[in-house]
Amino acid sequence: QKNSVCTEMTGFTRLLASRGAQPDGLVDSMPTIIVEQASREATRGFQVINRPWTMSEMLKGDAWRARVVEDYVFVAETDHLILKDIPNRATPELNVAFFFPYMSPVPREQAEVVKRYFSGDHLTVQPVGPSPALMHV
């Protein structure tokens, strides 16, 4: 809130997934929650699966409740460049995420990828990535 008193984004916590939930060289530089990374069997070599896995693992523990005091969290990746305050359009009933039309489960080729990692009805998978996203906690 230093640059804009109107922003709703006030804290920062890095989520680190590592083998054995081991810290790295940055944990002393920034607030970090560490979780076990997904196994090769879980990701089937597709490391992007580690992102939602990591979020799920974080929510299973108690460290995030002590660290994250806000009502909403913004999930971003290290290569996201944020140039303006992002309005919070999430509500307690509705999370929001960026729409990625190329991730649609409808075309046959993409449906096959979704079915590989999701055992439910592939048509219920929304074409959004794990980030950027805003959600109520």
Image: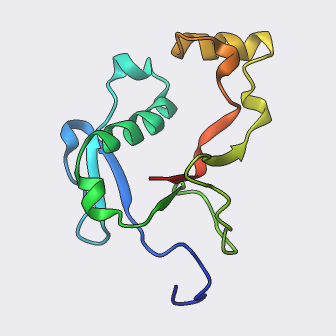
Q: Residue furthest front?
A: 93
Q: What residue is drawn where x is 70% and y is 47%?
A: 98
Which of 71/113 is in front? 71
132 left or right of 15? right
Q: What residue is drawn where x is 41% and y is 42%?
A: 55
Q: What residue is drawn where x is 30% and y is 55%?
A: 64
Which of 53/79 is in front? 53
75 left or right of 42? right
Residue 127, relative to residue 25: is it above or below? above
Q: Is residue 26 visible?
A: no
Residue 85, relative to residue 50: is it above or below? below
Residue 37 in picture, x, y percent from top left = 31, 35
50 left or right of 101? left
Q: Quadrant of residue 17?
A: top left
Residue 119 in picture, x, y percent from top left = 52, 10
Q: Quadrant of residue 24?
A: bottom left
Q: Is residue 21 visible?
A: yes
Residue 20, relative to residue 92: is it above or below? above
Residue 5 in picture, x, y percent from top left = 58, 88
Residue 16, relative to residue 127: is it above or below? below
Residue 60 in picture, x, y percent from top left = 28, 39
Which of 73/18 is in front? 73
57 left or right of 47? left
How many marks the image carries: the answer is 0
Which of 132/48 is in front? 132
Q: Quadrant of residue 91?
A: bottom right
Q: How is the image coloured?
A: rainbow
Q: What residue is drawn where x is 51% and y is 53%?
A: 136
